[in-house]
Image (cartoon, helix red, strand yellow):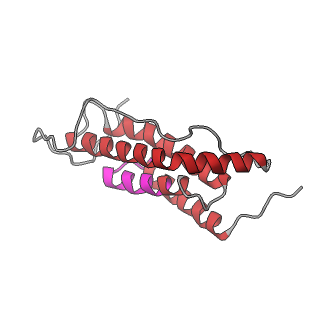
Amino acid sequence: MAAPQPTAADSQATSTIEASIALVFQHTTFAQFARGYKALRSIALDNTLSNEVAGRANKEVLHATLRGVLWFVHPGAGRQDVVDFNNLARETTELYRRAEPPRLARSAQAEGAGSGGVAGNSGVDEVQMGGETAGEDDGAGGEGNVEPTS
């Protein structure tokens, strides 16, 4: 049995995933990271795309979240990067929570059709890093050009 042909939307989303991965994994600034992260997140939550494409984007969001923690939430990170990453993680958690019921219903339909859809809680769990809150500023600045430490 032949695999279904990707739709134009799936093809465009796949191209966006590739471009976003490049943004997220080429560590330069938080703004660049956030741009790629948000693009991946929007594809992962798009109910008009195939489960395969949305599932791939979701997997990349999870990988990017871990990478973001390593880059932007460590003792040498600029305070503003920590605050910005916390805000991005909270925003993502809220978006996934709101999207969960439709995604579960869609996934159940896909599984019923035998397509092996993405099931269960595949969203980003809430991340709390160091108790930082928006608006706090110690004056240390956050240039966003933090190199990962080993």
Type of secondary structure dominating the magenta stretch: helix
For the record, the magenta segment spans 25-40
User: How many marks are shown on the rendered structure?
Assistant: 0
* Residue 51 is covered by the magenta coloring: no
Asked if 9 appears above or below 130 in the picture, the reply is below
Frontmost residue, 23 versus 100: 100
**Up-down relation of residue 135 to residue 39 (above or below):** above
Query: On the image, which quarter does residue 147 sit in?
Result: top left
In the picture, which quadrant includes the C terminus? Answer: top left
**The magenta stretch spans residue 37:** yes
Who's the residue at 45% across and 36% down the image? 125
The structure residue drawn at horizontal position 48% and vertical position 52%, both measured from the top left corner, is 41
Q: Is residue 87 visible?
A: yes
**Image x and y of residue 115, in percent:** 76, 49
Specify whether 107 is left or right of 20.
right
Residue at the bottom extreme of this rendering: 8
Q: Position of residue 6 (x, y in %)?
A: 71, 64
- Residue 37, position as x, y percentages in the image: 43, 51
